[in-house]
Structures are given as structure tokens and as C-alpha cells.
Image (cartoon, rainbow, N blue to C red):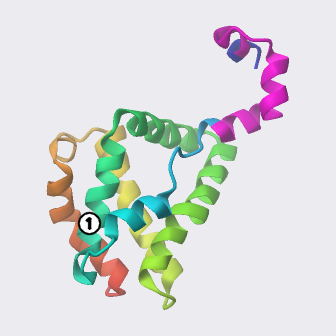
Amino acid sequence: MRAIGRRAQVDPALIVHYFGSKDGLLREALTLPLDPAAVLSEALAGVPADRVGQELVRRVVQVWDSPEMTLLLLSLLRTAVSHDLAMTYLRDMLQRTVIAAVSCLVGEDDAQRRAELVAAQMWGVAVTRYLLRLPALAAMTPDDLARTVGPSVQQYLAGEA
């Protein structure tokens, strides 16, 4: 906290005042600046049911490709794999936001499992595209990814997997 206070040129007590603790500061730093449900709702409005998987992939990758979101995504991924509290926070945040939003797309039949499969597919894309920077995947456009990954996501959404 002292190092953060020095870097921000503020008294560490001010950090404690606003965030309560290091854990509170970490939680705030890892908070998404957008509402995944709203992003998905907007992106998927009017999309035919058989194309939702492709549009979901396209829109999520477009969001992730913005410099601010890429930086946050990398922070989330790096921190979660090395810090138990961050991993717990990320899992809880995914449950409350992303998985809940995807669950709304699939209806009630086995929604949790299907939403988690979509999340696993998309986090796999995130790790390999942004963290590992595998060349072929990193070079793909959101449209390319929508065409290639979208069908798998569509199968999860439709309950075919």
C-alpha cells in the first residue's frame, strides 16, 4: 500500500479510506468497466437464433481488442493465475456477469453448464490470443474468429454439445 501510495503521490491512508484494504484495492482494479449483459444484449438484438454464437464471439473479441480492455483482460488473467483472492474474485465476477448473461441466452435447460462451456471457450481464446499471443490466433480479425470459433459457441448455446 505504501508503494502504491508513493507511486500515486498520495498518503497510503487515503487508499485505505477509499478501498478498505489491499484486497479492496485489488477488487476495484479488477472490476470490469462495462456490463457484460448490456454488451451482449446490444450486440445480439435482432440476431437470428442460429447466428448468436458467431455474433457473441465477434462482439466479445471487438470489445477485448480495445486497448483499455486488452490491458484489463491481461491484468485479470495474470493476476488470477497467481493470486488466490484474485482467482476467487474473477470466478465470482464471471458467475455474476458473464455466465449470468450467457445463461439468459440459453434458457433454463442446463443453462449453467452451457454458459460455463461458452465461458471456457472464450477464456481459451483470451489466453491464447492476448496472453500467449499465438501468432495465427493473434492475427485473426474478430470476423475470422466469429467464423471459426462461433460454431462451437453456437453448439454450446443450442445445447448440442
The magenta span reads: 5-28
| Residue in view at x 72 percent, y 14 percent | 5
Q: Quadrant of residue 59?
A: bottom left
Q: What secondary structure characterizes most of the magenta part?
A: helix
| Residue in view at x 22 percent, y 76 percent | 51
Q: Left of 125 or right of it: where is 116?
A: right
Locate the C terminus and report the quarter of the image it occupies. Answer: bottom left
Q: Left of 79 or right of it: where is 158?
A: left
Q: On screen, 142 above or below 53?
A: above
Q: Of the residues shown, which amino acid type is indicated by label 1?
A: Glu
Locate the N terminus and report the quarter of the image it occupies. Answer: top right
Q: Nearer the viewer, residue 38 or 82?
A: 38
Q: Is residue 121 magenta?
A: no
| Residue in view at x 48 percent, y 58 percent | 36
Q: Nearer the viewer, residue 112 or 20?
A: 20
Q: Is residue 8 magenta?
A: yes
Q: Left of 100 or right of it: where is 68?
A: left
Whole-percent x, y for residue 54 in the image: 23, 68
Q: Which residue is mark 1?
A: 55
Q: Nearer the viewer, residue 2 or 84?
A: 2
